[in-house]
Image: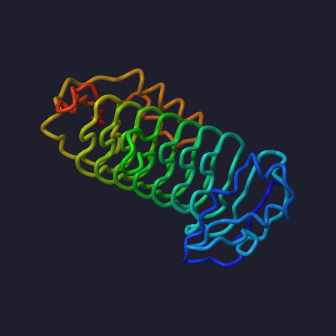
Amino acid sequence: MPLTFSLRNKTSIPLEVDAIRLETVREQSADEVAHTLVQYGNKQREIGEFFDVSGSAADNELVWEGDCSHVKLIGSKLIDGRIRVEGNAGMHLGAEMSGGEIIVSGHVTDWVGAEMHGGRIRVKGNAGHLIGAVYRGGRKGMTGGEILISGNAGNEIGHCMRRGLIAVGGNAGDATGVNLLAGSIFVFGENGIRPGVGMRRGTIGLLGTSPPPDMLPTFKYSGTFRPTALRLCLLYLRRSGFPIAEELLDLAVHRHCGDFLEFGRGEIWLRV
């Protein structure tokens, strides 16, 4: 049985659980883990005051049960292993992680995978703003790994992203791929305004059936084609369990290059 944290009472005060690290708790008993201090508002409290702790992390797996929408930093700086959230999760899920896997059965809020370096995050519900983004004042957002969101996501997905893959099965907000340095972002629903603003390199695929947003004047149309790279990426997503319709595998796209205020080496693909 994996080490399991079962929420007893939902709290409106944020609970920061970055002290719960897999490489530490797998050497501890459930009773020892329950005495771990976590940040509760402006105080430190034991995690056992909020969660029933049972099982063992000897198999490199953690499970969080309940509505953890006010529990921040789950899986922060994860190196390896697996974390499952059977419910919702709070801000900074998987922030700065470099390996392993996080699976969320519910919804998540902002800053999922912020400045992550590797590993995989899979969210079966909706996500908030700034997925895979850089923290304010930083230089690099996501530099590796994968973030797969089955539902909708908010604004500034992949802000300053340098490498990696982000896929959003539903709708996305404004400024998708803002200041994108490299990497790939795919949105399969409706997208907001100003995609790719300030992007230098990388690929943004807006593959939904809704009319795409107007391209910024600093982007230039460069033709219509069926990119082999798109088919390969979609096949990879399908093998990863992400739902990909058969019709998408032979999709034609309109290619727009830009942002020409930033050398114009990025590209946005719009579904034909």
**Residue nearest the viewer, comparing 39 with 67:** 39
In the picture as drawn, the residue positioned furthest to the left comes out as: 217
Residue 12 placement: quadrant: bottom right
Q: How many marks?
A: 0
**Residue nearest the viewer, comparing 156 with 98:** 98
Task: Give the residue displayed 33% in from the left and 37% down from the top.
Answer: 180
Task: Give the residue displayed 56% in from the left and 67% down from the top.
Answer: 69
State whether residue 156 is above or below residue 230: below
State whether residue 159 is above or below residue 252: below
Task: Give the residue displayed 12% in from the left and 38% down from the top.
Answer: 217
Give left or right: position of 109 versus 98.
left
In the picture as drawn, the residue positioned furthest to the front comes out as: 43
Residue 113 point in image, percent of width and height: 51, 47
State whether residue 3 is above or below residue 10: above
Residue 73 placement: quadrant: bottom right
Give left or right: position of 53 versus 192.
right
Residue 120 point in image, percent of width and height: 59, 41
The colour style of the image is rainbow
Residue 241 point in image, percent of width and height: 59, 41
Q: Which image quarter holds the C terminus? A: top left
Q: Which image quarter holds the N terminus? A: bottom right
Residue 56 point in image, percent of width and height: 84, 54
Task: Give the residue displayed 72% in from the left and 68% down from the top.
Answer: 47
